[in-house]
Amino acid sequence: MQPTTYPISLSIDYPDRDLNRLTTAFRVFLAIPILVVIGGVGSLVVFGPLLMVVFRQKYPRWWFDWNLELQRFGARVAAYVALLDDRYPATDDEQSVHLDYPYPYPDAAQGLNRWLPLVKWLLAIPHYVVLVLLDLAGLVAMVVAWFAILFTGRYPRSLFDFVVGVLRWHNRVVGYAFIMVTDQYPPFRLTS
């Protein structure tokens, strides 16, 4: 049985080249400025769309585009921190991270349930539990990958695919519960 495609998709190009060992060694320090930037603007994402969908049944295109680009930027930062890409995250270039989801219509009444945004964060609790466990496993995978990159210059493909799957799962939950892109409940899987 072929799984259905979820509306929120994330893929990261595997670096088929040697990664920069020096920036990999000091990644935790190099990522601090960009983490401050993403943390500062990330809080603006949730409340505007929530209020607009509930009270006006609208999801303006400009706000949707803002959220999509901010989530794309966050995905590039996450890929950089997870050692999946050794290029510093660009604020406006896709680089090797591809995140997309469809616009849920200017009239949210056509594509989104008016009251569901009030409880989506609650409905996603099973995902939070699973993601805590996956995050721990992902952290172990990143530490192993860190050593592999330092010694070989390469990210082991199986670890790469696992970490990308964890990031994909995160983006699906964020898109469902907080950015209100879809009412379709996120699947419990790492693959597309």
Image (cartoon, grey):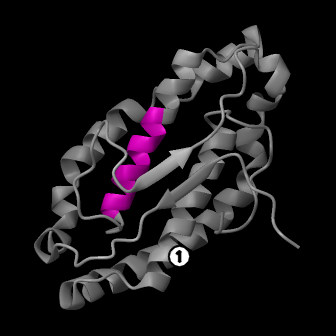
Q: Residue at x 22, y 79 (%)?
A: 18
- 16, 167: nearer the viewer: 16
State whether residue 88 is above or below residue 191: above
Q: Position of residue 41 (x, y in %)?
A: 37, 30
- Image quarter for residue 183? top right
Determine whether 107 is above or below 4 in the image: above
Where, quadrant-wise, is the C terminus in this rendering? bottom right
For disc 1, the neighbor class at 10 Å (few under 14, some 14 to 19, many from 20) is: some
Question: Depth check: 65 or 124 in front?
Answer: 65
Q: Which residues, given as a range, are shown in magenta?
A: 69-81
- The percent position of residue 52, horizontal first and vertical second, equals 67, 14
Question: Which residue reaches farthest right?
Answer: 1
Q: Which residue is mark 1?
A: 162
Q: Secondary structure at mark 1?
A: helix
**Image-based side of 124 in relation to 24, left or right:** right
Q: Position of residue 54 (x, y in %)?
A: 75, 17
Residue in view at x 83 percent, y 18 percent:
109
Q: Is residue 78 in the magenta section?
A: yes
Number of labelled discs?
Answer: 1
Is residue 73 part of the magenta span, yes or no? Answer: yes
User: 40 or 65: which is nearer to us?
Assistant: 65
- Amino acid carrying label 1: it is Phe
